[in-house]
Amino acid sequence: MGREPTRAGLLTQGDGRTVQVVILGNVHKSRVQPAAEHVRRVVQRYAELVAYDLKQEMDLSTVRADLVIVLGGDGAILRAAHQMGTNQMPVMGVNLGKLGFLAEVAPEEFETVFRTVLDGNYQVLDHLMLLCRLRTAETACRAELLSLNEVVVQAGPPFRMVEVELSIDGEQVASFAGDGLILATPVGSTAHSLAAGGPILRQDIAAVVITPLCPHTLTARPLVDAAERLYTLTVRPSVLPSSAFLVVDGIQVAQVGPGDVIEVRAAPVRFRLIQLRGRSYYRRLREKLGWGGDPRR
């Protein structure tokens, strides 16, 4: 079931309260520092700046703010989502990267857009996040992480085929032999999963895309199922020496061995993204993926 857009009245100035803002980015990216200085000047003109982090080090799990402005591409937004943890605040992305599916505001239009948001001409879309738990064969929890894009079990050195068994709500589905298996959110459906041949899902629906990575069986195809289910992944023992790794949103978490269990379910929090009025999801797909253009260019 999809989630309806919600309005966040906290960003309107009519209640007499000063709007509180966080600015995030990666200072090691060449365009971030000058853009951040411009954004900071604009924010301080209209609102209160409560946190400023260009080193991607700050723990935002207890910070209270009305808006988080992220400078960079989608990778910077993924990092911001991890910094916030269970304290997800509305995010507006200023695109300094390449595609920018999540960061749709151009730097030169930031002040105009920021004032538009302060006037309440926007909506907040809640996006599915996943909660991933890695357990040993003895059921001890080795890691627990939130994911905005995807959870991946993939082959490691010496890069031989791995076999990943998938169960959904306790029922065995299939064993996928190949380079690994991706469980992606709708937001992540335009990332690693798309490159592996998975479908694109609207970002506001609650579903999970299961995409095999270079499957050895030609009948192994992507599968879409409901977000509220429990997805269990295990790496089956192999007669050939191989290794597998758990990767969450592009970050290698741990090596996974036979008997280890990865449990994935909908997280108790949602990623909250500001969307401006008049800017639709399909318009973004047309612009970012070049739909409707001349295929010869």
Image: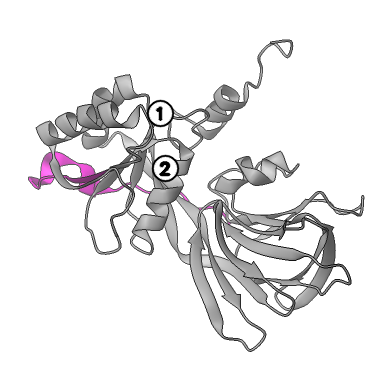
Amino acid type at circle 2 is: Ala
Residue at 45% x, 29% y: name it.
Answer: 279
The quarter of the rendered structure image containing the C terminus is: top right
Query: Which one is earlier in the sequence, the residue at label 2 or at label 1?
Result: 2
Viewer-proximal residue, 256 or 295?
256
Q: Position of residue 200 (x, y in %)?
A: 66, 41
Q: Nearer the viewer, residue 119 or 38?
A: 38
Q: Is residue 61 left or right of residue 206?
A: left
The reply to whether the magenta stretch includes residue 63 is no
Give the amino acid at mark 1.
Answer: Leu
**Camera-nearest residue between 142 and 191:** 142
What residue is pinned by disc 1?
96
Cβ–Cβ under 8 Å for marks 2 and 1 = yes
Whether 62 is drawn above or below 108: the answer is below
- Residue 192 image offset from top left, x and y in percent: 64, 45
The answer to whether residue 5 of the structure is visible from this angle is no
Residue 49 showing in the rendered view: yes
The mark found on residue 76 in the picture is 2
Q: Disc 2 to disc 1, how far (Cα)?
A: 10 Å
Task: Find residue 153 and name its label.
Answer: none
Residue 33: x and y in percent read: 28, 31
Residue ranking furthest to the left:
16
| Residue at the extreme right | 218
Magenta range = 1-23
- Residue 185 drawn at (x, y percent): 59, 53
